[in-house]
Image: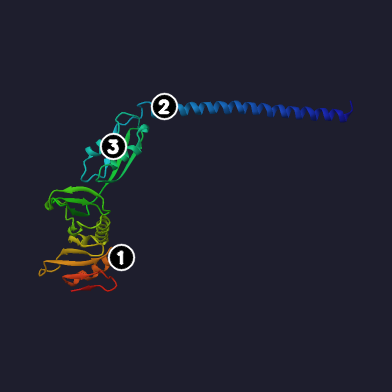
Amino acid sequence: MNATGTDQNRVSRVLVERYLDRLGRRRRWRRLSVTITVFLALMGLAGYSLLWHTKVFDVRTTTVSGVKVLTKERILAAAAIPAHEPVAAVDNEAAKRRLLAIPRVKQAWVERSLPHTVAITIVEREPAAALPNPDGSFVIVDSDGVAFDTADTAASIPGRVPVIHLERFADRRPADRAATVAGALAALRALPDPLRARVLTVSATGPYAITLTMTATTAKQHSVTVLWGGPDQPDLKARILTVLIGRGAAHYDLSAPAAPAFS
């Protein structure tokens, strides 16, 4: 055999050896991949079983924060978090829905925390105004107009919450009443805290005829009235009133904020 034939045979053997080597590596890698996949699957199954079907990470503590008027016991009863069940199995959204069914609860969060805790955080609705009922009782609403509590008498209205008088709405459309209440609440929201605390009552004969009665600014006054007008430009009206209120007038007219008046 000549030199050329020998070289060709040598090259062929090298190519075959390289091919067989690559084929062997591929087979070993496939076996390793299968082994790793099976191992990870078993680990995942073990972790799932540990979290969801054992009491290694069970609920032992449920914390409650954010309560002011509501009690921790009522929140726990409404949330109905099962004790000694797996933490991972707690249905956060279902518990949240049960909490939001409490009228006073405005927002709620339910969070799971391994190994043994469920944390509940709530935000309660704050009373913004009281609406009188025909029987002399009152409905307490928050700044969004959501009713969440009642008061049997004026003396039992919480804090210094102003009363919105709507006596003339008995024969008016519900939409007019709703718009007027929304306008009155917008006025209260716009006022800075010191002025809002001075509001005694809100009277309205329509959505664009809202009047605030406030505590007096001088000893000679019994009270101060503010003709607020409609629900438009509440922030501007509040800024104007903040500037004018120190003049000691008994009546302020903000119904046209571009041309406010006082007397």
In the picture, which quadrant includes the C terminus?
bottom left
Residue 28, how many percent across, how many down? Answer: 62, 26
Q: Amino acid at mark 3?
A: Ala
Decide if residue 141 is on the left or right side of residue 87. Answer: left
Disc 2 on helix, strand or loop?
helix
Disc 1 on helix, strand or loop?
loop
> Hey, which quadrant is residue 67 in on the image?
top left
Q: Amino acid at mark 2?
A: Ser
Tell me which label, 2 or 3, sits earlier in the chain: 2
Disc 3 on helix, strand or loop?
helix
The reply to whether callout 2 and callout 1 are in contact (CB within 8 Å) is: no
Q: CA distance from mark 2 to mark 1?
A: 59 Å
For the residue pair 80 and 30, the one nearer the viewer reads as 80
Q: Which tag is nearer the camera, tag 2 or tag 1?
A: 1
- Mark 3 sits on what residue? 79
- Mark 2 sits on what residue? 49
Question: Counting other residues with Cα less than 10 Å from the Cα at mark 1, is it few (<14), some (14-19), or many (20 or more)?
Answer: some
Residue 233 — which label? 1
The reply to whether callout 2 and callout 3 are in contact (CB within 8 Å) is: no
Decide if residue 186 is on the left or right side of residue 159. Answer: right
Tell me which label, 2 or 1, sits earlier in the chain: 2
Residue 187, how many percent across, how many down? Answer: 25, 61
